[in-house]
Image: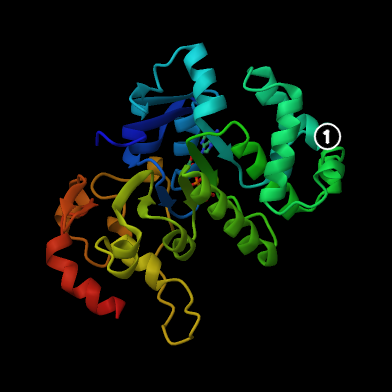
């Protein structure tokens, strides 16, 4: 995909765990176009955060990534120190799930916001303060001057996550990785913070890779979806198509297992529990939970292939399409 800003190709992440090698992410390929938002959706343990950590080259000790990660035509996995520092501080930015776990509680908001951009020579201290104040107003933080002098514990979770959005936007990145940016917040502030993040990235034409376990939210706020199961992407397509007509049985199951706001749909959970990549047996990782699995599914891992303009990793897509459609209605 030549026009893509960000690409992952066959990304594999493994980690040494108690003397053995564990696969956490398996053959993940995705891309994000300029000004595009892509949702990476999956249940807990599916490898979403690990993929983002790989994309930032911020993997935990003992973990290794192979495959290819590209940003604007440059290779991220093999980038040297200077290129990597540039990539992390100017090209991309990361918004974490829990701002309190990430921010240093002993530093003021002003120090938190300005230190990185001043240190990397991106702007002077005065410029950083001025730009921070402007961005704080943009994300709905009143009284920026007073807030800059405060410590993180003096701000509510919602306000602190707005500060994180300011920090992410400050160096004018071209891509934001947002890893469950609203999950740790109270329900009442979640939608406000999500709306602000969306408004800002749209206004500035910034791309986003949005990580969430919430398929409804992802479908509502992104252009395309990549659905992840056990460390692999099982289905990719436009958010509208994946949401309204899933082709992979896992996506279809996820859609049917969430509660309906109208109360009409029956809650049909996917049998069994989600697994991590290292727990997967041979064959399709989803086969033990799949209503449509055959012997072939249990013995042969399906490769992603293009079906109806989408990328789907399922041997039986064509055969089961009608039944999935019927079940969804
Ligand atoms: N430091 C580590 N050492 C070993 N295994 C790890 C480590 N960090 C994460 N894992 C494992 O890697 C797998 C993927 O984890 P990851 O954090 O990417 O999941 P996730 O999809 O982000 O889930 P969640 O929705 O809970 O955030 C999980 O099984 C997890 O237990
Ligand atoms: Mg995670």
**Could you tell me which quadrant the C terminus lies in?**
bottom left
Q: Find the residue positioned furthest to the bottom.
A: 264
Question: Percent from the top left, x then y, of residue 264?
Answer: 43, 87
Q: Quadrant of residue 250?
A: bottom left
* SS at circle 1: loop
Q: Nearer the viewer, residue 54 or 60?
A: 54
Q: Is residue 123 visible?
A: yes
Residue at the spot 53% in from the left edge and 54% down from the top edge:
198
Residue sitting at x 32%, y 37%: 4
Closer to the camera, 65 or 155? 155
Number of marks in picture: 1
Q: Is residue 154 above or below residue 87?
A: below
Picture coordinates of residue 112, whole percent (x, y): 75, 32
Which x, y percent locates residue 92?
51, 32
- Given residues 17 and 35, the one toward you in this image is 35
Seen in the picture, residue 47 relative to 287 is either above or below; the reply is above
Question: With respect to residue 92, does 19 lie above or below?
Answer: above
Label 1 within 8 A of ligand 2 by Cβ = no
Can the viewer see residue 59 in this picture? Answer: no
Residue at horizontal 34%, vertical 34%? 8
Give coordinates of residue 247: x percent, y percent.
Answer: 24, 62
Q: Which residue is mark 1?
A: 108
Residue drawn at point x = 48 percent, y = 85 percent: 262
Say few, some or many: other residues with alpha carbon within 10 Å of mark 1 (under 14 / 14 to 19 / 20 or more).
some
Quarter of the picture holding the N terminus: top left
């Amino acid at each position: 995909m030549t026009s893509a800003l960000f690409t992952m190709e066959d990304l594999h992440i493994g980690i040494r765990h108690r003397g053995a090698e564990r696969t956490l992410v398996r053959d993940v390929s995705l891309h994000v176009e300029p000004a595009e938002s892509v949702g990476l959706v999956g249940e807990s343990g599916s490898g979403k955060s690990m993929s983002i950590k790989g994309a930032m080259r911020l993997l935990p000790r003992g973990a290794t990534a192979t495959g290819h990660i590209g940003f604007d035509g440059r290779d991220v996995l093999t980038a040297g120190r200077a290129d990597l520092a540039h990539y992390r501080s100017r090209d991309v930015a990361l918004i974490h799930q829990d701002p309190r776990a990430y921010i240093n509680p002993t530093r003021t908001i002003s120090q938190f916001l300005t230190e990185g951009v001043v240190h990397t020579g991106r702007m002077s201290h005065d410029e950083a303060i001025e730009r921070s104040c402007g961005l704080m107003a943009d994300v709905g933080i009143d009284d920026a001057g007073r807030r800059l002098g405060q410590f993180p514990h003096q701000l509510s979770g919602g306000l602190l996550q707005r500060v994180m959005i300011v920090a992410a936007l400050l160096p004018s990145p071209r891509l934001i990785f947002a890893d469950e940016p609203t999950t740790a917040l109270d329900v009442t502030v979640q939608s406000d913070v999500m709306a602000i993040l969306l408004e800002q990235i749209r206004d500035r034409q910034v791309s986003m890779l949005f990580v969430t376990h919430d398929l409804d939210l992802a479908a509502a706020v992104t252009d395309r979806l990549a659905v992840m199961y056990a460390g692999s992407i099982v289905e990719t397509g436009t958010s509208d198509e994946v949401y309204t007509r899933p082709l992979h049985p896992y996506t279809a199951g996820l859609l049917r297992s969430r509660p309906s706001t109208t109360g009409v749909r029956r809650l049909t959970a996917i049998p069994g529990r989600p697994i991590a990549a290292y727990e997967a047996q041979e064959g399709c990782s989803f086969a033990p939970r799949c209503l449509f699995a055959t012997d072939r599914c249990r013995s042969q891992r399906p490769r992603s292939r293009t079906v109806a303009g989408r990328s789907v990793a399922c041997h039986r897509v064509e055969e089961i399409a009608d039944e999935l459609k019927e079940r969804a209605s």
